[in-house]
Image: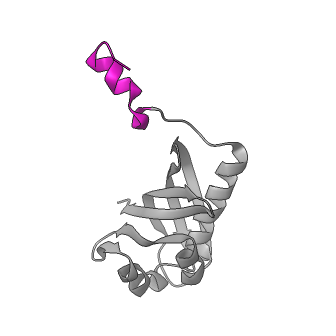
Amino acid sequence: MTLSSPRAARLAHGARKAGTLSPREQGVLWDMEEHFWTSGADYARATTAANAVMIFPYPRGILQGDQIWNHLPERTGWRSVALAERRVTRWRDIALLSYRVSAEKADMPIFKAVCASTYLHDEDGWLRISHEQTTET
């Protein structure tokens, strides 16, 4: 196949073919994301790829693989979370969720951040491959 212009070549690239998920698939991913916050480290680990990358606010920084699980118990188990301004984008077997979170935990100030999680769909279902939090000031 011959493309007639650089613009046509760019449009043909797979990453430019963004789409969306069905309402059911979106519900599955948003449920997973909310449980990531509220259900504890065991649930988070079971729904996250082995070599995932997570970026947390200072001082934690960039964590990958087993580093995540040495840190995550401190950050899970929020008693309530509200995910607002939800957005979903899909590229083939990858879905990106972005949102604002307001999370509460006993004896802690309310945590507010903008977040993004990336999921990969494989034969067994969806797995988180990355997560990022940027605190709101």
Percent position of residue 49, x then y: 48, 70
Percent position of residue 36, x then y: 57, 70
- For this orientation, the residue located farthest to the front is 1
Q: Quadrant of residue 11?
A: top left
Taking the image as shown, residue 17 lies to the left or right of residue 46, namely left
Q: Nearer the viewer, residue 9 or 126?
A: 9
Q: Does residue 48 sit above or below 91 in this rendering?
A: below
Which residue sits at x=56%, y=48%?
86
Q: Does residue 100 sit above or below 81 in this rendering?
A: above
Q: Does residue 95 sit above or below 135 in this rendering?
A: above
Q: Which region of the structure is painted magenta?
A: 1-16
**Quarter of the image containing the C terminus?**
bottom left
- For this orientation, the residue located farthest to the top is 4
Residue 10 on the magenta span: yes
Taking the image as shown, residue 39 lies to the left or right of residue 64, namely right
**Quarter of the image containing the N terminus?**
top left
Percent position of residue 91, x then y: 49, 42
